[in-house]
Image: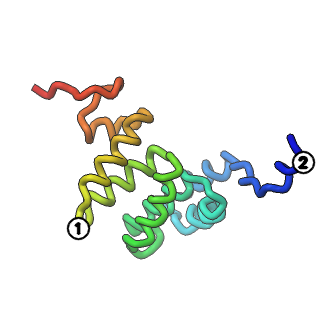
Amino acid sequence: MRWLDRLRPRKPAANPDHMAVALSCAKAGDYAAALAIWEPLAQAGFSRAQNNIGACFAEGLGVTVDLNLARRWLQLAAEAGDPVGQRNYAALHMREADADFEIAADFYRRAAEQGDAPSQDMLKLDASGRQRDER
């Protein structure tokens, strides 16, 4: 490592145990506890935590529904390349009153290209990325 690299801020290592604990809290319906774990991780740039917070705001899980906050968190996750974040960001664009199908299709495709099966299903793609014959 060069000495200048040491001066650059680095994203702290994610602790998989924290994400597992947060997921357990969410599955048990304790979204407040899950959000308390995800929030510092999301602020540090962890895309799956950003996705999870965005999903909570989109669905009103532990917080009041706020589609603007949902969109902001999901966009961060989607643009960071998280396939679940890309799928959820696309879905949000599909459900809004002023739905933007081009953005939705773009992010469904990005997620599908990373192997996200629900996104592939939305686009009717097979695992190799080719259009399925639905006859």
Which residue position is annotated with label 2? Answer: 3
Disc 2 packing (10 Å; few <14; some 14–19; many ≥20): few
Residue found farthest to the right: 3
Which residue position is annotated with label 1? Answer: 98
Picture layout, residue 68 above or below residue 22: below
Q: Which numbered circle lies on residue 49?
A: none
Residue 51 in the image, given as x and y percentages of width and height: 49, 56
Picture layout, residue 84 above or below residue 56: above
Secondary structure under badge 2?
loop
Picture layout, residue 123 above or below residue 129: below
In screen coordinates, is 82 left or right of 11?
Answer: left
In screen coordinates, is 104 left or right of 50?
Answer: left
In the depicted view, which residue is nearer to us: 132 or 31? 132
Residue 74 in the image, given as x and y percentages of width and height: 45, 59
Residue 33 in the image, given as x and y percentages of width and height: 59, 65
Picture layout, residue 113 above or below residue 72: above
Q: Residue flagged by tag 2: what amino acid is it? A: Trp
| Residue pictured at 52% horizontal, 64% vertical | 30
| Residue pictured at 26% horizontal, 65% vertical | 96
In the depicted view, which residue is nearer to us: 3 or 79? 3
Q: Quick one: quadrant of the C terminus?
A: top left
| Residue pictured at 42% horizontal, 66% vertical | 70
In the depicted view, which residue is nearer to us: 48 or 75? 75
Name the front one of labels 2 and 1: 2
